[in-house]
Image: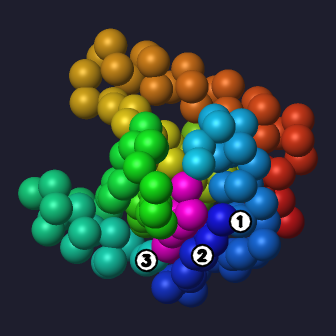
Amino acid sequence: MNIVCKNDQMTVDIDEDQVKCLVMCFLSWKKVCCQEVSICFVNKTMIAKLHGDYFQDATPTDCISFPIDAPQDKSNGYKVLGEVFVCPEIAFEYASTHHLSPLKELSLCIVHGLLHLLGYDDRNVKNQVIMYKEERLAISYLQKKGVLLHA
């Protein structure tokens, strides 16, 4: 599987190998078969622009996902799961405000984005409960596997 990891921000050092390991372990755990997925780390300006352009809300956010090929698509051929854009600065600010581990919060943002690529939705309370439960399970699993982002 090709995990494209691109770092277009300068606020936080990103270990691309750790990101790729986290993504690979998560997708394996979820039994997702695809040939490619992209994780792109961007600054506040870029995430706000994406948020405004695609979701009509120009405020910065922690992550945005763009699904491409449905994970349940059983057709042959090269399958691109999608792209996740993550803003480490927003994740770190949230972690600081809530007294959380910044790198664990950044890991959670990646997982959250990947869950969106898999079809999870958090636009209403019922779906939020389902998605947040799945996030907690994923983070627990990835922590046990030792693949959460770390210093």
Q: Which residues are magenta?
A: 34-41
C-alpha gap between disc 1 and disc 2:
7 Å
Query: What residue is shown at x 43% (from left), y 17% (from top)?
Result: 129
SS at badge 1: helix
Query: What residue is shown at x 45% (from left), y 76% (from top)?
Result: 42
| Camera-nearest label, 2 or 3 | 2
For disc 1, the marked residue is: 20
Expressed as whole percent of the image width and height from the top left, the position of residue 133 reads 55, 20
Q: Are marks 3 and 1 in contact (CB under 8 Å)?
A: no
- The residue at the far left in this view is 56
For disc 2, the marked residue is: 5
On screen, residue 55 above or below 37:
above
Query: Any magenta on residue 42?
Result: no
Q: Mark 1 packing: few (<14 Cα in 10 Å), some, or many (20+)?
A: some
Query: What residue is shown at x 64% (from left), y 46% (from top)?
Result: 27
Q: Can residue 79 be seen here?
A: yes
| Camera-nearest label, 3 or 1 | 1
For disc 3, the marked residue is: 43
Q: Are marks 2 and 3 in contact (CB under 8 Å)?
A: no
Expressed as whole percent of the image width and height from the top left, the position of residue 127 reads 34, 20
Q: Is residue 95 left or right of residue 75?
A: right
C-alpha gap between disc 2 and disc 3:
15 Å
Indicate the quadrant where residue 29 lies: top right
